[in-house]
Image (tube, grey):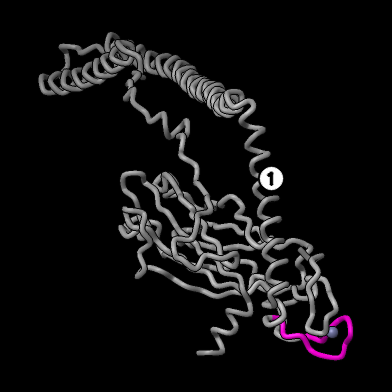
Amino acid sequence: MDDIKIVLPCGFYCKYEYFRNNKEKFECPICKTHYINTKECLNMTRNRLVLSQSDVENAKKDLDDCTTTLKYYEDDLEHFIEEESNILKNQIDLRREELKIMVIKKIDDYYEGQLKKIEQEKKKKFDKFISRIGRIKLLEKDIYGFNISDKNDIQTQIDMNIKLFRTIDNATILAENLKVTFSKSIYGLREDSKNFDVSTLFGELYLREETKRIFCICSNFDDKQANFVFKVNDISKYKGQEEFKIVSNPCIFRNFEWFIIIQMEKNDIAVILQCIRDQKNDDSSILTQSEIRFFDYKMNVIDDFTIKSKNDFSIYPECVLLRYDKVENMINDIGFYDKKDDSFTLNILIKVDPQQIMAIDSEK
Ligand SMILES: [Zn+2]
């Protein structure tokens, strides 16, 4: 496009690239004797013709690029679809094997821990028996060696019998308790619920987001504006994640790559428009008007919900179009959240035309 020859009011020709700096007026680069009014000059009939011819050529090239790629898929359609689903199947297979190894290891580690406990208890039980039986045997020795002579007076005999009875009672309690210790093992195994959530452990399949460019619904469609639709599916599955970023496919427009980003940090959620510039258009401004619009259930744009913003992406490559302080608020905004699909669809209209935007500003 930069090589197109533009006819000048003085009759000379210059390359289109001189007009790319977006200045309203500039000195004639060829004869340097006058100023050129960009708008008037590009509006000359011959220039309009060559520019529109060049637009057609460029559009054809773009279409060719797209259809060439599609042809590549078409030639081996089944293979590509098969290959794509195989990649996913492999991921799931791999996950299954990983999880099996992980779960078995966790179970084995836990099992080892339980065995260790049992071993420790065995030792404790052995020591406990030895020490208790020793005490019982000593008491037994005392009891059977206890001699109450009938030569003692009656009261002393009664007191001694009471004392002997207490000793026997103590020895019996000790012996009974020790017997109980051996009647069953110290530990039992309680079996817990067999239900646990496999999807939490395994991870779930989710529908990826979709990006597409659509024809402008309004009538004054021209190449200075583009309309992108970004649909985020399965949004509930993202809830509760500390930090996440969903990035659209690149939207190519006016030689720039545009991205729509949904970014969440803590509970804050933002819709961001990002522009990545090529080395080629380094010096030009990317003064842009963007509109974020929402669809109703019939896929019509809801005008009341349109949010407009202006940004020069050559200075600030990212522009926050919308911010919610909670994911729930965004989800609950019935204006554009689709309960049936668990999705929401954003329509982002991008207008890049510094002269026109500046003109609108100066009129205000
Ligand atoms: Zn001139």
In percent of width and height, residue 58 lies at 70, 56
Amino acid, disc 1? Asp
Whether residue 88 sits left or right of residue 37 in the image: it is: left
Q: Which residue is mark 1?
A: 65
Looking at the rendered image, the quarter that the N terminus falls into is bottom right
Which residues fall within the magenta stretch? Answer: 26-38
In percent of width and height, residue 206 lies at 46, 38
Whether residue 325 sits left or right of residue 116 in the image: it is: left
Q: Judging from the image, what secondary structure is the residue with disc 1 in?
A: helix
- Measured along the vertical axis of the image, is residue 90 above or below residue 22? above
The residue lying at 56 percent from left, 69 percent from top is: 351
- Measured along the vertical axis of the image, is residue 92 above or below residue 45? above
In percent of width and height, residue 275 lies at 64, 63
In percent of width and height, residue 163 lies at 20, 22
Mark 1 Cα-neighbour bin, 10 Å: few <14, some 14–19, many ≥20: few
Instruction: Assess whether residue 30 is covered by the magenta stretch.
Output: yes
- Measured along the vertical axis of the image, is residue 335 above or below residue 101? below
The residue lying at 46 percent from left, 40 percent from top is: 207
Whether residue 15 sits left or right of residue 270 in the image: it is: right
